[in-house]
Image (spheres, rainbow, N blue to C red):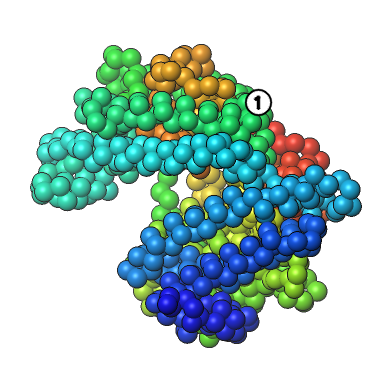
Amino acid sequence: MSASQNIDLARHPLTHWAGPLGLPEFDKIEDSNFGPVFDAALAAHAAEVEAIAANPEQATVANTLEALELAGQPLDRVSSIFWCRAGAHTNDAIQAMEREISPKMARHFSAISMNDKLFARINDLYLRRDALGLDPETLRVLEKTWKGFVRSGARLDPEGKKRLATINEELASLGARFGQNVLADEKEWVLFLDEGDLAGLPEFVRGAMAQAAETRGQKGKYAVTLSRSIYEPFTTFSERRDLREKAFKAFAGRGETGGETDNAGVVRETLSLRAEKARLLGYGSYAALKLDDTMAKTPKAVMELLEPVWNKAREKAAADEADLQRLAASAGSNDKLAAWDWRFYQEKLRAEKYAFDEAELKPYLQLEKIIDACFDVATRLFGITFKEVSGIPAWHPDARVFEVFNADGSKRGLFLADYFARQSKRSGAWMSALQSGYKLGEGSTPVIYNIMNFAKPKAGEPALLSLDEAKTLFHEFGHALHGMLTDVTWPSVAGTSVSRDFVELPSQLYEHWLTVPAVLEKHALHYKTGKPMPKELLDKMLAAKTFGAGFATVEFTSSALVDMAYHARPDAPAEPAAFEAETLEKLGMPEAIVMRHRTPHFLHVFSGEGYSAGYYSYMWSEVLDADAFAAFEETGDAFNAEMAEKLRKHIYAAGGSADPEELYKAFRGKMPSPEAMMEKRGLV
Ligand SMILES: [Zn+2]
């Protein structure tokens, strides 16, 4: 009947990888294959899981936990190729397939976590866990697996399960509505200006505004819109205080317009359902539920991080405010500095103090040399080496293949990289795995890839990067190292399978080595003269980066604190808007700064559950990377061998095989403190 019945998963190029170096034979893959192969692979996985659940023998680690971890290999393989193509080289057929596959996958995995017989076996093992003589990693995998089932509602009675399913569905649709309301408000509002209203605006802002007006059918006019890429530069540069105020009020009021798109009801209902979900699953608050499997673990730990940062940021912002007020006065304004003045005067101050042209750096940052720098740093820190192999087909001719070797010359895995932007690639930069590295069963070596979106140079010219782009290259390569250096037994804790507030440590930390003088001297060479980048140029650039940290940190931290206040209480506030105001009042929020994301348009927190009670994690990761790099700085050597070995062993190789707090302490000897981060941000 279905085409999937004719698929031989053991031979199909999507699930049986017979290409050079163990890669898939990309040139044999046809887009029309994905659908039937997915169906066959889902059915095969479901059958494997059913056999594990129905096993009449008592549960053992081998017949249950191990069998479950190793099940579904064809599904893993077709998925990894499919998602690679969906991001890096898509087309209409792949996009249509994406819409079909996502709900199928969600249903498939939800059925597994609701499988009572399967959970009974996991639960049996879990209850006997201390008597099984397990090594620490296996014990952790068992506990994590058990917790995963419990958090999905496996222990609830039938009525509780039904209620949880209803809550999850309602939360999903509330999240979608929240996002659509914000989008509608952003689309709805526009301010058309004429040539005469543009005082202060640089060419790039005028260009973007002209373009925005044209797409709205007002060619020849200039549109202020609420897209951050227009709103922020407009309020930064416009000399017209009245227009800045208008734009600011519209931007800060997204989702709070009182009409059909007002998010007050959505937020109230969301918070109430989240509190109920936490109670149902046995947690004291929604934040406790969300943080349970993170490094921070508790709302209290998050507050202990955010509070000292908040206090320092407010002090810094207060000092900056006085400077800006003076600048405003000397420019002839007697008004008290308002929220729509801050970016404007801050930019004036920046131009005065840190005049700097970023384009001066570019000739020193050649893509090929920065790739070499990434590899070179990995060799110096971890002993691994890279060798490019040409002539191997991947998902696109631009994708390059590198073999990765251990210090003793043995094979570690593969690294693939696809650097240039093209129409078939989504924007941004990311790391992912075609195959992860683990030892269980027959074992598997990591096949990791990086995708970038750098502008492709004309033939014969070198690709040059901005400093931010070079940092992105190091960032994603840091994630790739997390995947490539992995040294664990169990697939579910391999590589980047760690908590949300830990996963950016290996990537953000790696960025630090880009600006280590020894690295720049060797690799940041002018593409014409071959001379290294002058140190003064870099120092000027770095000093400019910390400018305005008080404002940025207050904007960010107030959002993180309000997110936590909403979710760390056992119930939900009756009036979220009033609660937001009270919380800010208690915190002593400066009058002339607003939250980066106010409640009615806080998409991270309310358009889905991904970053709810989790906005803090951006800053948490920053604390970790600054504190971790300080460990090297304290030795006076950015390549200190002893630190590097600890870093490899406890962070890059360990994946999620142990509690992240223990891993960090094993590397650093102590828990991280926010001092290094505050210094890096220029707050102290
Ligand atoms: Zn990242």
For the point 70% across and 33% down, the residue is 673
- Tell me the quarter of the picture where residue 487 sits: bottom right
For the point 23% across and 41% down, the residue is 187
Q: Is residue 533 left or right of residue 190?
A: right
For the point 45% across and 69% down, the residue is 85
Q: Is residue 418 left or right of residue 523?
A: left
Q: Is mark 1 within 8 Å of ligand 1?
A: no
Residue 144's x, y, as percent?
70, 47
Residue 139's x, y, as percent?
80, 50
Q: Secondary structure at mark 1?
A: helix
Residue 554's x, y, as percent?
49, 27
How many badges with numbers are in the image? 1
Disc 1: CA contacts within 10 A as few (<14), some (14-19) or many (>=20): few
Which quadrant is home to the C terminus? top right
Which quadrant is home to the N terminus? bottom left
Amino acid type of the residue that numbered disc 1 sits on in the rendered structure: Lys
Camera-nearest residue between 575 and 336: 575
Q: Is residue 569 above or below residue 165?
A: above
Q: Is residue 382 above or below residue 509?
A: below
Q: Is residue 448 visible?
A: no
Residue 20's x, y, as percent?
60, 85
Question: Which residue bears the numbered disc 1?
Answer: 300
For the point 75% across and 70% down, the residue is 441
Q: Is residue 257 above or below residue 642?
A: above
Q: Is residue 405 visible?
A: yes
Camera-nearest residue between 256 and 441: 441
Q: Is residue 443 left or right of residue 596?
A: right
Camera-nearest residue between 386 and 186: 186
